[in-house]
Amino acid sequence: MANNKIWSSITIFETGLSAAEWGWRIITLVFIGGSATGSALIAKADPILSQFGPIYWIATGIVVALALSLIFFLIKSAMLKQSIADLYKVQLMKKSDVNPLAESFTNLIIHIEDLKLPGQQLHKNKHFKGCVFTGPSTLAIIGGLYRDNSFNNCGEIIALPSNIFLSGVTLLLDCTVEKCQFLQLTILVDQATGNEMLAHGAPVRGIESSNPEPI
Protein backbone atom coordinates (compact mmCIF):
# COMPACT_ATOMS: atom_id res chain seq x y z
CA MET A 1 0.00 0.00 0.00
CA ALA A 2 1.12 3.55 -0.65
CA ASN A 3 2.20 5.74 2.24
CA ASN A 4 -0.39 8.18 3.54
CA LYS A 5 -0.01 11.93 3.29
CA ILE A 6 -1.71 14.31 5.71
CA TRP A 7 -5.47 13.79 6.02
CA SER A 8 -6.25 17.34 6.96
CA SER A 9 -9.97 17.40 7.64
CA ILE A 10 -13.21 15.53 7.32
CA THR A 11 -16.25 17.62 7.95
CA ILE A 12 -19.53 15.73 7.81
CA PHE A 13 -20.33 12.06 8.24
CA GLU A 14 -23.88 10.82 8.33
CA THR A 15 -23.27 8.33 11.13
CA GLY A 16 -20.98 10.51 13.22
CA LEU A 17 -21.79 13.52 15.33
CA SER A 18 -19.68 16.52 14.46
CA ALA A 19 -18.62 19.11 17.00
CA ALA A 20 -21.26 21.47 15.60
CA GLU A 21 -23.98 18.86 16.13
CA TRP A 22 -22.89 18.27 19.70
CA GLY A 23 -22.77 22.02 20.25
CA TRP A 24 -26.30 22.39 18.89
CA ARG A 25 -27.61 19.69 21.22
CA ILE A 26 -25.91 21.14 24.28
CA ILE A 27 -27.13 24.66 23.53
CA THR A 28 -30.65 23.34 22.95
CA LEU A 29 -30.72 21.50 26.28
CA VAL A 30 -29.28 24.47 28.16
CA PHE A 31 -31.72 26.88 26.53
CA ILE A 32 -34.77 24.69 27.19
CA GLY A 33 -33.69 23.93 30.77
CA GLY A 34 -32.85 27.55 31.49
CA SER A 35 -36.10 28.81 30.00
CA ALA A 36 -38.15 26.27 31.96
CA THR A 37 -36.37 27.16 35.21
CA GLY A 38 -36.71 30.88 34.50
CA SER A 39 -40.44 30.50 33.79
CA ALA A 40 -40.96 28.64 37.04
CA LEU A 41 -39.11 31.35 38.99
CA ILE A 42 -41.13 34.09 37.27
CA ALA A 43 -44.34 32.22 38.09
CA LYS A 44 -43.20 31.97 41.71
CA ALA A 45 -42.45 35.69 41.81
CA ASP A 46 -45.72 36.71 40.16
CA PRO A 47 -48.17 38.03 42.80
CA ILE A 48 -51.09 36.08 41.32
CA LEU A 49 -49.43 32.77 40.34
CA SER A 50 -47.46 32.63 43.59
CA GLN A 51 -50.71 32.01 45.43
CA PHE A 52 -51.26 28.65 43.66
CA GLY A 53 -48.26 26.93 45.18
CA PRO A 54 -45.19 25.07 43.90
CA ILE A 55 -47.13 22.62 41.74
CA TYR A 56 -48.27 25.47 39.48
CA TRP A 57 -44.77 26.98 39.28
CA ILE A 58 -43.34 23.61 38.24
CA ALA A 59 -46.21 23.06 35.79
CA THR A 60 -45.44 26.42 34.20
CA GLY A 61 -41.81 25.41 33.72
CA ILE A 62 -42.82 22.05 32.22
CA VAL A 63 -45.26 23.66 29.80
CA VAL A 64 -42.57 26.12 28.63
CA ALA A 65 -40.04 23.28 28.25
CA LEU A 66 -42.50 21.21 26.18
CA ALA A 67 -43.37 24.17 23.99
CA LEU A 68 -39.71 24.98 23.32
CA SER A 69 -38.93 21.31 22.68
CA LEU A 70 -41.70 21.18 20.09
CA ILE A 71 -40.38 24.33 18.40
CA PHE A 72 -36.82 22.94 18.24
CA PHE A 73 -38.15 19.60 16.97
CA LEU A 74 -40.03 21.34 14.16
CA ILE A 75 -36.93 23.37 13.27
CA LYS A 76 -34.74 20.25 13.12
CA SER A 77 -37.37 18.38 11.09
CA ALA A 78 -37.53 21.22 8.60
CA MET A 79 -33.73 21.29 8.35
CA LEU A 80 -33.63 17.52 7.79
CA LYS A 81 -36.28 17.64 5.08
CA GLN A 82 -34.44 20.50 3.38
CA SER A 83 -31.20 18.50 3.50
CA ILE A 84 -32.94 15.49 1.94
CA ALA A 85 -34.45 17.71 -0.73
CA ASP A 86 -31.03 19.20 -1.48
CA LEU A 87 -29.56 15.69 -1.72
CA TYR A 88 -32.23 14.59 -4.20
CA LYS A 89 -31.75 17.80 -6.14
CA VAL A 90 -28.04 17.13 -6.54
CA GLN A 91 -28.66 13.53 -7.56
CA LEU A 92 -31.22 14.59 -10.18
CA MET A 93 -28.96 17.24 -11.68
CA LYS A 94 -27.57 16.48 -15.09
CA LYS A 95 -24.22 14.83 -14.66
CA SER A 96 -21.16 16.55 -16.07
CA ASP A 97 -19.20 15.33 -19.04
CA VAL A 98 -16.26 13.67 -17.33
CA ASN A 99 -13.02 12.69 -19.01
CA PRO A 100 -11.63 9.94 -16.74
CA LEU A 101 -8.15 10.47 -18.22
CA ALA A 102 -7.97 14.10 -17.04
CA GLU A 103 -5.58 15.06 -14.26
CA SER A 104 -7.75 17.79 -12.71
CA PHE A 105 -11.50 17.99 -12.06
CA THR A 106 -13.25 21.17 -10.91
CA ASN A 107 -16.93 21.78 -10.05
CA LEU A 108 -18.17 18.61 -11.72
CA ILE A 109 -20.95 16.18 -10.84
CA ILE A 110 -19.14 12.88 -11.12
CA HIS A 111 -20.96 9.59 -11.21
CA ILE A 112 -18.41 7.01 -10.12
CA GLU A 113 -19.17 4.91 -13.17
CA ASP A 114 -17.92 7.81 -15.31
CA LEU A 115 -14.46 7.44 -13.74
CA LYS A 116 -14.11 3.92 -15.11
CA LEU A 117 -10.91 3.34 -17.04
CA PRO A 118 -9.86 0.57 -19.39
CA GLY A 119 -7.90 -1.91 -17.34
CA GLN A 120 -7.08 -1.01 -13.74
CA GLN A 121 -9.48 1.54 -12.22
CA LEU A 122 -6.70 3.68 -10.76
CA HIS A 123 -6.65 7.49 -10.46
CA LYS A 124 -3.27 8.52 -9.04
CA ASN A 125 -2.08 11.97 -7.94
CA LYS A 126 -5.13 13.69 -9.42
CA HIS A 127 -6.82 16.85 -8.16
CA PHE A 128 -10.54 17.19 -7.46
CA LYS A 129 -12.04 20.50 -6.27
CA GLY A 130 -15.69 21.39 -5.69
CA CYS A 131 -16.89 18.13 -7.20
CA VAL A 132 -19.82 15.93 -6.25
CA PHE A 133 -19.11 12.19 -6.31
CA THR A 134 -22.39 10.30 -6.59
CA GLY A 135 -23.42 6.67 -6.39
CA PRO A 136 -24.79 4.28 -5.60
CA SER A 137 -21.37 2.71 -6.07
CA THR A 138 -18.12 1.83 -4.35
CA LEU A 139 -15.03 4.02 -4.11
CA ALA A 140 -11.63 3.05 -2.70
CA ILE A 141 -9.36 5.69 -1.17
CA ILE A 142 -5.68 5.22 -0.36
CA GLY A 143 -3.64 8.11 1.00
CA GLY A 144 -3.97 11.62 -0.35
CA LEU A 145 -4.86 15.03 0.97
CA TYR A 146 -8.51 15.73 1.78
CA ARG A 147 -9.79 19.16 2.83
CA ASP A 148 -13.32 20.36 3.75
CA ASN A 149 -15.21 17.44 2.23
CA SER A 150 -18.59 16.06 3.24
CA PHE A 151 -19.71 12.44 3.19
CA ASN A 152 -23.50 12.12 3.05
CA ASN A 153 -25.48 8.88 3.20
CA CYS A 154 -22.23 6.91 2.89
CA GLY A 155 -22.56 4.86 6.05
CA GLU A 156 -19.49 3.52 7.77
CA ILE A 157 -16.11 3.40 6.08
CA ILE A 158 -14.57 -0.04 5.61
CA ALA A 159 -10.85 -0.54 6.20
CA LEU A 160 -9.61 -3.41 4.06
CA PRO A 161 -7.17 -6.06 5.27
CA SER A 162 -3.52 -5.45 4.51
CA ASN A 163 -2.10 -6.52 1.13
CA ILE A 164 -5.49 -7.05 -0.45
CA PHE A 165 -6.01 -6.93 -4.22
CA LEU A 166 -8.96 -4.96 -5.62
CA SER A 167 -10.49 -5.49 -9.04
CA GLY A 168 -13.22 -3.49 -10.72
CA VAL A 169 -13.34 -0.83 -7.98
CA THR A 170 -12.55 2.81 -8.71
CA LEU A 171 -9.50 3.79 -6.68
CA LEU A 172 -8.20 7.24 -5.71
CA LEU A 173 -4.50 6.88 -4.87
CA ASP A 174 -2.67 9.83 -3.30
CA CYS A 175 -5.16 12.31 -4.79
CA THR A 176 -5.92 15.83 -3.57
CA VAL A 177 -9.64 16.30 -2.91
CA GLU A 178 -10.94 19.69 -1.76
CA LYS A 179 -14.45 20.93 -0.95
CA CYS A 180 -16.12 17.91 -2.52
CA GLN A 181 -19.24 15.94 -1.63
CA PHE A 182 -19.54 12.17 -1.54
CA LEU A 183 -23.12 10.91 -1.88
CA GLN A 184 -24.43 7.36 -1.48
CA LEU A 185 -21.05 5.67 -1.76
CA THR A 186 -19.50 2.72 0.01
CA ILE A 187 -16.03 3.96 0.94
CA LEU A 188 -13.16 1.46 1.11
CA VAL A 189 -9.77 2.45 2.54
CA ASP A 190 -6.46 0.82 3.38
CA GLN A 191 -5.41 0.41 7.01
CA ALA A 192 -3.21 3.52 7.12
CA THR A 193 -5.89 5.76 5.61
CA GLY A 194 -8.51 4.18 7.86
CA ASN A 195 -6.48 5.05 10.95
CA GLU A 196 -6.05 8.64 9.71
CA MET A 197 -9.80 8.99 9.14
CA LEU A 198 -10.65 7.35 12.46
CA ALA A 199 -8.40 9.86 14.22
CA HIS A 200 -10.49 12.66 12.66
CA GLY A 201 -13.75 11.23 13.93
CA ALA A 202 -14.90 9.23 10.91
CA PRO A 203 -16.87 6.01 11.48
CA VAL A 204 -14.40 3.35 10.31
CA ARG A 205 -14.81 -0.42 10.63
CA GLY A 206 -12.19 -3.09 10.09
CA ILE A 207 -9.13 -1.45 11.66
CA GLU A 208 -6.62 -4.16 12.46
CA SER A 209 -5.07 -4.29 15.92
CA SER A 210 -1.57 -2.88 16.10
CA ASN A 211 -0.69 -5.38 18.80
CA PRO A 212 -0.71 -8.94 17.48
CA GLU A 213 -2.26 -11.56 19.70
CA PRO A 214 0.21 -13.83 21.50
CA ILE A 215 0.66 -17.25 20.00
Image (spheres, grey):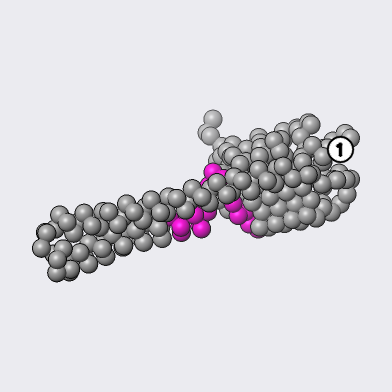
Left or right of 169 on screen, residue 212:
left
| Residue 59 forms part of the magenta stretch | no
Report the number of discs.
1
Residue 175 appears in the picture as rendered: no
User: Can you tell which quarter of the image residue 206 is in?
Assistant: top right
Rendered residue at 74%/55% (across/down)? 130
Which kind of residue does numbered mark 1 sit on? Leu
Depth check, front residue: 121 or 44: 44
Depth check, front residue: 12 or 28: 28
Q: Locate residue 94, reporting x and y percent.
A: 78, 44
Say which element carries label 1.
loop
Q: Quadrant of the N terminus?
A: top right
Q: Residues within 10 Å of mark 1 (few under 14, many from 20)?
A: some
| Residue 12 forms part of the magenta stretch | yes
Q: Quadrant of the C terminus?
A: top right
Residue 158 appears in the picture as rendered: yes
Highlighted magenta segment, given as a residue range: 5-25
User: Can you tell which quarter of the image residue 146 is in?
Assistant: bottom right
Rendered residue at 48%/51% (across/down)? 76
Rendered residue at 51%/58% (across/down)? 20
Left or right of 107 on screen, residue 100:
right
Rendered residue at 53%/34% (across/down)? 213
Query: Which residue is identified by label 1?
Result: 117
Depth check, front residue: 35 or 116: 35
Q: Locate residue 72, reporting x and y percent.
A: 42, 54
